[in-house]
Image (spheres, rainbow, N blue to C red):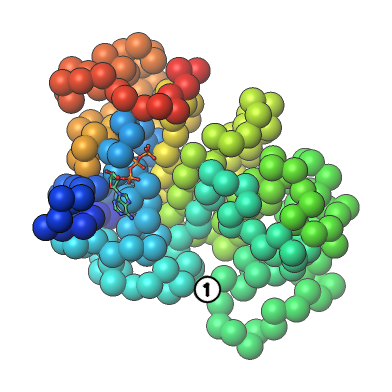
C-alpha cells in the first residue's frame, strides 16, 4: 500500500519567491481507502498528487509502495501503480487518436513493449465490454476520434483508462470540476461504481464540500502544506458542511479560502 513519510517540497528555495508546498506530510493508506482532500488555495493538494504520481520528486521524505521507496522513480515507471484523472477533460487522453487506440494505450500501460500495441478482435471485445459499463454509448463509437467527444464523455473515458489496469492508487484531481452539474453527477456516479467494484485505493481532491463529505471513507484537510485533520469514516458520516468549515477554521485559525469552493 502507499505511504508518505515526512514528505516536504519547497519551490524556489532561498529566493524571494520561496514557497513551502508540502511540510513533512505523513499519509498512510489502508487498502481500499477512498480519501477526499479539501484545503485552501495553495495548500499543497496538487503538489501532493504530483509527488505521488512522480511528476515531481520531494525534497525530503519517502514515498513508499508496498514498503519500497519510489520517490525517485520517474512518472512513466510508476504508471503501472498510479492512475490519474485530471480536471481538464483534454488531459489524459490523446485527442487525435480513436477511442479504441486510446484504450489500447491504457491497456499496455506498465506492460512490456513488444506485446503488441495493436487492437485485435479479442481486445476490441474487451474494450466494448468496458465501455458498455459506462452506459453512455461509447461502445458503438470505437473509431471516433477522442478530440470530438464532449467533456463528460472524455472524462468517462479518462476514468476508464486510468483504472483499466487496476492501479494501486487512483488519483482524482478535481476531475468533475470542469463539467456541468449533470455530467459531473454522471462522472461521480461512475467513479463510485468503478472504485467500489475494483476496490481501488483512491485519493480525490475536490472543492465541493458536500462531495468531500459524501464520497469515500476518509476526509483529509490541508492548509499551508500540512495535513491538519484526517477524519475517519464514522465521524465523516454524520458531518455537515458547516461543521466541516467550522472544524477547518478552529484548527487552522482562519476561514477556508478557496476561490473555487462549492458548498454542495
Ligand atoms: N511549479 C511551481 N513553482 C513554484 N511554486 C509552485 C509551483 N507549484 C506550486 N507552487 C506553490 O506551491 C504551493 C502549493 O501549490 P499547490 O498547487 O500544490 O496547491 P493547491 O492546494 O493545489 O492549490 P489550489 O487549490 O489553488 O489549486 C502554492 O504556494 C503554489 O504557489
Name the residue: 48% across, 68% down: 80
**In the visual, does 85 lie left or right of 254?**
right
Spot occupied by residue 139 in the image (x, y as percentages of width and height): 83, 53
Quadrant of the image containing the N terminus: bottom left
Up-down relation of residue 78 to residue 169 (above or below): below
Outermost residue to the bottom: 114
Pointer 1 residue Cβ closer than 8 Å to ligand 1: no
Name the residue: 65% across, 84% down: 115
Spot occupied by residue 217 in the image (x, y as percentages of width and height): 40, 33
Spot occupied by residue 260 in the image (x, y as percentages of width and height): 45, 28
Up-down relation of residue 71 to residue 25 (above or below): below
Question: Does the rendering let one see residue 34?
Answer: no
Up-down relation of residue 206 to residue 50 (above or below): above
Name the residue: 11% across, 58% down: 14
Name the residue: 83% across, 45% down: 137
Q: Please state the total of marks drawn on the protein image.
A: 1
Q: Which of 130 and 156 is in front in this view?
A: 156
Spot occupied by residue 235 in the image (x, y as percentages of width and height): 31, 21
Q: Nearer the viewer, residue 58 or 196?
A: 58
Outermost residue to the right: 140
Mark 1 residue crowding within 10 angstroms, few (<14) / some (14–19) / many (20+): some
Give the residue pinned by disc 1: 110
**In the visual, does 96 lie left or right of 230?**
right
Question: Does the rendering let one see residue 260?
Answer: yes
**In the visual, does 20 lie left or right of 94?**
left
Rendered image quadrant of residue 111: bottom right
Outermost residue to the front: 16
Label 1: element kind: loop
Q: Nearer the viewer, residue 45 or 79?
A: 45
Amino acid at each position: 500500500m502507499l505511504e508518505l513519510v515526512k514528505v516536504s517540497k519547497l519551490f524556489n528555495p532561498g529566493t524571494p519567491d520561496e514557497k513551502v508546498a508540502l511540510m513533512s506530510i505523513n499519509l498512510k493508506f489502508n487498502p481500499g481507502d477512498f480519501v477526499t482532500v479539501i484545503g485552501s488555495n495553495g495548500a499543497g493538494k496538487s503538489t501532493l498528487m504530483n509527488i505521488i504520481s512522480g511528476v515531481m520528486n520531494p525534497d525530503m521524505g519517502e514515498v513508499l509502495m508496498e514498503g519500497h521507496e519510489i520517490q525517485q522513480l520517474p512518472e512513466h515507471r510508476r504508471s503501472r501503480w498510479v492512475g490519474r484523472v485530471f480536471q481538464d477533460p483534454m488531459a489524459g487522453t490523446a485527442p487525435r487518436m480513436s477511442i479504441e487506440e486510446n484504450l489500447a494505450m491504457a491497456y499496455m500501460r506498465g506492460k512490456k513493449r513488444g506485446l503488441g500495441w495493436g487492437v485485435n478482435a479479442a481486445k476490441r471485445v474487451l474494450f466494448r465490454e468496458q465501455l458498455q459499463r459506462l452506459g453512455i454509448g461509447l461502445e458503438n463509437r470505437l473509431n471516433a476520434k477522442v478530440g470530438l467527444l464532449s467533456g463528460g464523455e472524455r472524462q468517462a473515458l479518462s476514468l476508464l483508462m486510468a483504472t483499466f489496469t487496476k492501479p494501486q492508487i487512483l488519483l482524482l484531481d478535481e476531475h468533475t470540476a470542469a463539467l456541468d452539474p449533470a455530467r459531473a453527477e454522471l462522472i461521480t456516479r461512475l467513479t463510485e461504481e468503478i472504485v467500489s467494484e475494483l476496490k481501488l485505493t483512491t485519493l480525490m481532491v475536490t472543492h465541493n464540500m458536500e462531495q468531500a463529505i459524501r464520497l469515500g471513507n476518509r476526509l483529509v484537510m490541508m492548509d499551508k502544506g500540512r495535513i491538519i485533520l484526517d477524519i475517519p469514516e464514522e465521524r465523516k458520516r454524520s458531518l455537515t458542511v458547516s461543521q466541516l468549515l467550522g472544524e477547518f477554521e478552529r484548527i487552522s485559525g482562519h476561514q477556508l479560502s478557496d476561490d473555487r469552493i462549492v458548498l454542495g
